[in-house]
């Protein structure tokens, strides 16, 4: 027996309410995370006296106690903002079925890993690098799961931008994870990028670990925001 029109309408109303809650929690998480990190960046000065640049100073360094003046603010933003983003992702999970559940679970896991990178700053080196590593792997899993979900015809992108931001996020996250293994002249070290928090100064204007870390984080935020946009 099929669902009645009333049942379908009730289901749609419930889904829209869950999406609205997910949007609100995502916005709150981003409003905790982004201003805290940006303020810590504004007051940051490197060991060579240079001001903050997202192209050669990593997120990890903003949260390093004894090095970053507002490390506690940066780490608090990562931790509390990340936890709220986890909750927002779990609300998004309640609006989908099948493979979509994996996508939202992977997103929740990525934000949880980011929160743990704030709880365990780079001063706690091994725990911090483990959290950062899993942030990138979970983001990669979420993006690949999303593309497979679309390819199987189980869903359609919320908008063309959702697909664009997902593709960009996958490109940057993959580059972060794979570039150290390629032995390129422009990448003069073979350790994983998430282990390069204490790489010495002076650094080039474009330093791969920091630049890709920031771009990956931004593209992940933009992708999730687009997936949660209000339906037309």
Image (cartoon, rainbow, N blue to C red):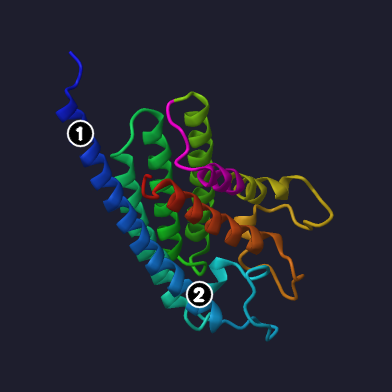
Measure how far apart labels 2 and 1 are at the Cα level: 43 Å
Q: What stretch is highlighted in magenta?
A: 154-169
Task: Tell me whether circle 2 and circle 1 mark residues in contact (CB < 8 Å).
Answer: no
Q: Which residue is drawn at 52% across and 81% down?
A: 66
Q: Can residue 67 be seen in this view?
A: no
> In the rendering, at what x and y percent does residue 24 appear?
31, 58
Q: Is residue 92 magenta?
A: no
Helix, strand, or loop for circle 1?
A: helix
Q: Mark 1 points at which residue?
A: 9
Locate residue 77 relative to residue 166 in the image: left or right: left
- Given the current orientation, which residue lies at the most extreme bottom position? 49
Q: Out of 83 and 26, give the one closest to the viewer.
A: 26
Badge 1 local density, few (<14 within 10 Å), some, or many (20+)?
few
Q: Look at the image and tell me in which quarter the N terminus lies.
A: top left
Residue at the top extreme?
1
Which residue appears at 39% of the width and 34% of the height? 100
* Residue 230 visible within the image: yes
């Amino acid at each position: 027996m099929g669902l009645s029109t009333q049942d379908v309408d009730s289901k749609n109303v419930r889904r829209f309410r869950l999406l609205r809650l997910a949007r609100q929690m995502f916005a709150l998480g981003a409003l905790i995370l982004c201003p805290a990190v940006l303020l810590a960046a504004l007051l940051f000065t490197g060991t060579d006296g240079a001001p903050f640049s997202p192209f050669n100073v990593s997120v990890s360094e903003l949260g390093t106690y004894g090095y970053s003046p507002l490390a506690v603010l940066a780490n608090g933003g990562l931790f509390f903002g990340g936890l709220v983003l986890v909750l927002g992702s779990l609300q998004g999970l309640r609006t989908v079925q099948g493979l979509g559940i994996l996508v939202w679970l992977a997103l929740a896991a990525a934000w949880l890993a980011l929160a743990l990178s704030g709880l365990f700053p780079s001063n706690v080196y091994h725990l911090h690098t483990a959290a950062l590593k899993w942030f990138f792997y979970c983001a990669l899993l979420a993006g690949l799961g999303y593309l497979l979900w679309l390819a199987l015809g189980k869903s359609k992108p919320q908008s063309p931008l959702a697909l664009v931001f997902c593709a960009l996020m996958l490109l940057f996250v993959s580059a972060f994870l794979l570039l150290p293994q390629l032995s390129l002249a422009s990448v003069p070290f073979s350790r994983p990028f998430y282990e390069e928090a204490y790489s010495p100064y002076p650094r080039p204007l474009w330093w791969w670990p920091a630049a890709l870390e920031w771009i990956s984080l931004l593209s992940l935020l933009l992708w999730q925001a687009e997936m949660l946009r209000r339906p037309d």
